[in-house]
Amino acid sequence: MAAKEETKKDRSWVGPIVGAVIAGIFAIVVAVINLAGTSKNQSQAGTTTTTTQASASTTASSAGSAGKKVVSGKQLTLPSPGQGCMGKAEIDFDTMKVAPNVPEIHRETADLSYQSCTGIMVVEGGMAQLDTPPSSAEDCAQASETNPLRNPITHELIRNEMPLVKGKHLCLKTKLGKIVHLAIDEVTPVAPDGSSLPPLKDYAFTVDVWEP
């Protein structure tokens, strides 16, 4: 009987130790759960920050895609090349230079050419005509790509005052990708040279140019 009581006393420490072990395990589990929750929140915060930064970057990129205006309100005239088929004129809008009388069109640099036998031609790409000024450089560029005039605009159309008339607006792109807006200020018939055909025209433009 005494031996049983002694054994019982010897095992009395087991309960507290087991309880302590269980409490310790529970504390560890709680700590792990809290740590996992903190890590998840940090990850979500990082993702939100990255997404916000990416969105801001995209917005900034979109806002800057128009390019800055490098020419504003410049006056240029595309002169009639004369009645003979040898007459040629051209404009390079990258350098803002007009060549009123050239033996041949410089296709590597000229953006707009004017030949009495063929008419007015965009050397590369298309040119749109608008009733009102374009609201932005992007709108001007898009119009030139999606709704261009026939190219070339033949001398028959020019002689009959179609389609380029005073008050209209033209959009095209240069060889270097710049975006050009031309407001047609004046259309002046050239004095007849004895030909029975209606005269060709001089075209006076106000020019705006944006970088690509």
Image (cartoon, rainbow, N blue to C red):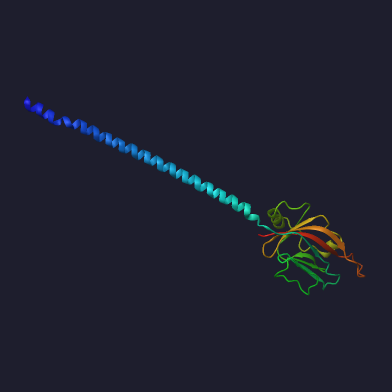
Q: Is residue 192 above or below residue 47?
A: below
- Which residue is at the front of the view, 207 or 138? 207
Total marks drawn? Answer: 0
> x and y percent of residue 158 in the render?
84, 62
Identity of the residue drawn at 46% across and 43% down: 44
Q: 190 left or right of 70? A: right
The answer to which image quadrant residue 210 occupies is bottom right
Q: Give x and y (percent) for residue 145.
A: 70, 57
Measured as percent of width and height from the top left, residue 168 is found at 80, 55
Q: Residue at x 72, y 57 (%)?
A: 144
**Left or right: where 18 falls relative to 159:** left
The answer to whether residue 170 of the structure is visible from this angle is yes
Q: In the rendered image, is residue 163 in sight?
A: no
- Quadrant of image for the C terminus: bottom right
Tell me: residue 156, above or below residue 84: above
The single residue placed furthest to the left in the displayed view is 2
Q: Quadrant of the N terminus?
A: top left
Image location (x, y in percent) of residue 8? 13, 28
